[in-house]
Image: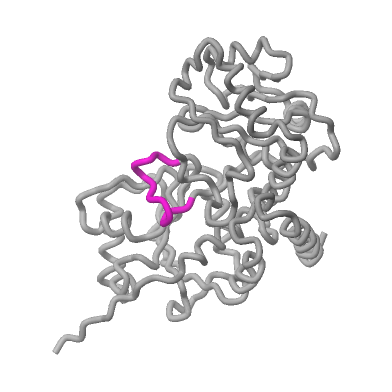
Amino acid sequence: MSPNTHLSLFFLSLFLSISLPVLSSPYISPLTFIPNYQKMLKSFKIFSYTPPQPLVFSTPAESLFFSSLLNSSFLTPDPDRAHLFFVPFSSATPTRSLSRLVNELRTDFPYWNRTLGADHFYVSCDGLGFNSDRNLVELKKNSVQISCFPTQRSSFIPHKDITLPPLADPHHAPVKNESKNYLGYVKYGAVKESSLVNELSDDQDFLVERQPSDVLTYEWRLSVSKFCLFEYGDGDVSGISDAVSFGCVPVVITDRPIQDMPLMDVLRWQEIAVFVGWKNKSGGGSDGAKQLRHVLGRTYGDEKRYEEVRGSCVTAGQHLVWNEEPQPFDAFHMTMYQLWLRRHTIRYARTEVA
């Protein structure tokens, strides 16, 4: 299917989604998203500094983002045309070497000092912690960090930093019109072994997978389940992208607010997922399954409301897909779109030396 066809189908699905009440749209700004996306494609330019050595990343998502960026039309050899500047370095770069790299940017190029690095960005899956070194302080506090989801709280600054959508294994197309036979699906590793999981195992409305399954079985389980359970912080949340794509509404069990969800500048996650506050996640109490069922029934007991949310999941799912060759509106382009939204930075006036 050609990119133009993909674009036409997406315009159609977007029109249908914003024709519904605003609450059913998965987008934060459904009326301006498409025009802004088109502006980004036409004008957004990034200058990449030359890496000091071949780059090695710790995750496939980082590598795929980097290779997609290098082969994209966003890259420009002219730094004067650039809106943002990419600082490339390997995942295992020592702190001292990273400080030296930033210092070289400061002394060898005029761009860092104009904003103290605020119009620069870098990729680091684990994120950077705070440090007393001036170079690292400016890199951490001013530059946009692109990390992997989830990121440690101490390594992520909300509204500035970005997380990459999880890179899922390639799957077949979601099963169409599959009846939802199960209320919830708990994937092996997504929620830690606990009294809650044990209770759900005894509940015939919940499908608990204790051992990893083959791809086709996994896809079928996603397709026939209304909700997919994930534990934020301790569990494996990489399957959220799969759940969304297959119309299995994610239920995120958490004991604190989440501020690093992927594409938070684009998607209204409260219309795509259910966030369940759980102070005692490891235990869940003796009636954890009953409490969970109550929350899901109270929030999405109405079938029409559930179908709206499931539809938002499927629409949003196309933005969480990584492709070896980037396609319109996929995970790479949505990450670039979030960078484009951050292109306006305060440019400090350069002091002329008398």
Residue 331: x and y, percent? Answer: 62, 53
Residue 52 highlighted magenta (yes or no): no
Look at the image and tell me whether residue 246 can be seen: no
On the rendered structure, is 270 left or right of 174?
left
On the rendered structure, is 88 left or right of 249?
left
Q: Residue furthest bottom?
A: 354
User: Which residue does the image show at 50% across and 42% down from the upper left?
Assistant: 149
Residue 103: x and y, percent? Answer: 25, 63
- Residues in magenta? 151-162
Name the image quarter holding residue 198.
Answer: top right
User: Which residue does the image show at 85% across and 38% down from the upper left?
Assistant: 177
Q: How is the image coloured?
A: one colour
Q: Residue furthest right?
A: 177
Q: Observer-nearest residue: 108 or 210?
A: 210
| Magenta stretch, overall SS | loop
In the figure, 110 relative to 141: above or below? Answer: below
Q: Observer-nearest residue: 219 or 197?
A: 197
Name the image quarter holding residue 216.
Answer: top right
Q: Residue furthest left?
A: 354
Q: Observer-nearest residue: 67 or 287?
A: 287
On the rendered structure, is 181 left or right of 349?
right
In the figure, 235 relative to 175: above or below? Answer: above
User: Which residue does the image show at 27% across and 55% down from the upper left?
Assistant: 136
User: Which residue does the image show at 75% across and 59% down from the upper left?
Assistant: 19
